[in-house]
Image (tube, rainbow, N blue to C red):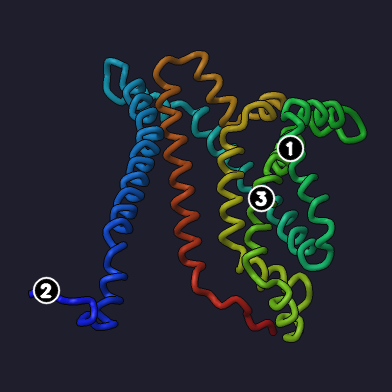
């Protein structure tokens, strides 16, 4: 039984019109999903295959996992790892104290200075680390500030240089976090509760940009743990020079140390993700007494 056009109801015509594009739309969705799966598989292979090859190289000794036992039994491995981790923690603390108030004040009071501050924070990309450390050694190797003559002074110079190297990552991360919140309203609300500037930064702004600070901290930690040039010129027992040393003197241990450092980096990333998850859902404005 055929149906004439006059017998089709308006609702039936509308359903026929809306149902026709469903197949092309579903086909496009399936195609996009297949493309994204392909990109994901290629990306995983790009990152995983070198790790598998490195693991196979680390097992090249006659005794399985002998390279790992030799690495953990080497006293220089643990000492250099602890020293670089200590420098990384100091660098993150100093960079956070420097960057968070600066980025907050620029966004709140002097937004026209943002291009200038961004240019200054990008200078570590222009000035090579070898030039930076050469200037530090030339300036602080003689009186009145002969810091390179002592271990504490050399460590201080090393941390100061790492703070400079971390500026692009810390500032960009913190500035992005500040852009996501209404700092003007938060500041006015905190001031109405009687808070001063230090209290506003520590108890209002910092909790709201904690995840951004942690992201910059992760990048800083990765840079410090693998940095070689500055630590080598300052004769510091850091992890970067240790990696270079065993790379010249050992055969299978460098692959084992590479995987161990990679695992530590992922462990730090997991800790940052865990801390960031715990910080979600908190109240943006806190009561200040």
Dots 1, 3 in contact, CB < 8 A: no
Q: Nearer the viewer, mark 2 or mark 3?
A: 2
> Mark 1 or 2 closer to N-term?
2
Outermost residue on the left side: it is 1
Q: Is residue 264 above or below residue 282?
A: above
Q: Which mark is drawn over residue 2? A: 2
> Mark 2 or 3 closer to N-term?
2
Query: Could you give the CA–CA distance between mark 1 and mark 2, rounded to whole angstroms?
Result: 78 Å
In what element is the residue under mark 2? loop
For the C terminus, which image quadrant? bottom right
User: Which residue is at 31% across, 17% downward?
Assistant: 60
Q: Is residue 156 above or below residue 101?
A: above
Which residue bears the numbered disc 3? 170
User: Which residue is at 33% across, 29% downward?
Assistant: 52
Which residue bears the numbered disc 1? 124
Q: Is residue 40 above or below residue 19?
A: above
Percent position of residue 263, x then y: 42, 39
In what element is the residue under mark 3? helix
- Front residue (pair 31, 11): 11
- Front residue (pair 6, 184): 6
Percent position of residue 54, x then y: 38, 25
Percent position of residue 143, x then y: 91, 31
Dots 1, 2 in contact, CB < 8 A: no
Q: Label 2: few (<14), some or many (≥20) within 10 Å?
A: few
Percent position of residue 71, x then y: 42, 26
User: Which residue is at 81% across, 34% downward?
Assistant: 147
Query: Could you give the CA–CA distance between mark 2 and mark 3, rounded to whole angstroms?
Result: 72 Å
Q: Label 3: few (<14), some or many (≥20) within 10 Å?
A: many
> Mark 1 or 3 closer to N-term?
1
């Amino acid at each position: 039984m055929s149906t004439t056009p006059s017998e089709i109801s308006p609702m039936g015509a509308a359903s026929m019109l809306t149902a026709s594009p469903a197949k092309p739309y579903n086909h496009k969705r399936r195609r996009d999903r297949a493309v994204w799966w392909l990109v994901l598989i290629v990306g995983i292979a790009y990152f995983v295959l070198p790790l598998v090859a490195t693991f196979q190289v680390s097992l090249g000794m006659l005794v399985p996992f002998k390279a790992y036992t030799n690495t953990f039994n080497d006293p220089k491995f643990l000492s250099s790892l602890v020293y670089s981790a200590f420098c990384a923690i100091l660098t993150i603390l100093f960079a956070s104290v420097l960057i968070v108030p600066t980025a907050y004040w620029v966004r709140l009071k002097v937004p026209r200075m943002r291009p200038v501050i961004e240019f200054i924070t990008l200078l570590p990309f222009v000035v090579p680390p070898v030039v930076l450390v050469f200037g530090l050694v030339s300036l602080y190797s003689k009186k009145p500030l002969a810091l390179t003559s002592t271990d504490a002074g050399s460590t201080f110079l090393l941390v100061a240089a790492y703070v400079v190297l971390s500026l692009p990552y810390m500032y960009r991360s913190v500035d992005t976090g500040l852009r996501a919140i209404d700092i003007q309203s938060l500041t006015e609300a905190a001031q109405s509760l009687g808070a001063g500037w230090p209290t506003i930064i520590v108890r209002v702004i910092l909790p709201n940009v904690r995840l951004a600070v942690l992201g910059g901290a992760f990048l800083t930690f990765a840079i410090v743990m693998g940095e070689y040039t500055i630590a080598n010129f300052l004769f510091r027992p850091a992890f970067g020079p240790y990696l270079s040393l065993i790379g010249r003197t050992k055969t299978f241990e460098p692959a084992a140390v590479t995987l161990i450092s990679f695992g530590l980096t992922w462990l730090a990333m997991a800790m940052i993700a865990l801390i960031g998850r715990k910080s979600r859902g908190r109240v943006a404005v806190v009561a200040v007494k």
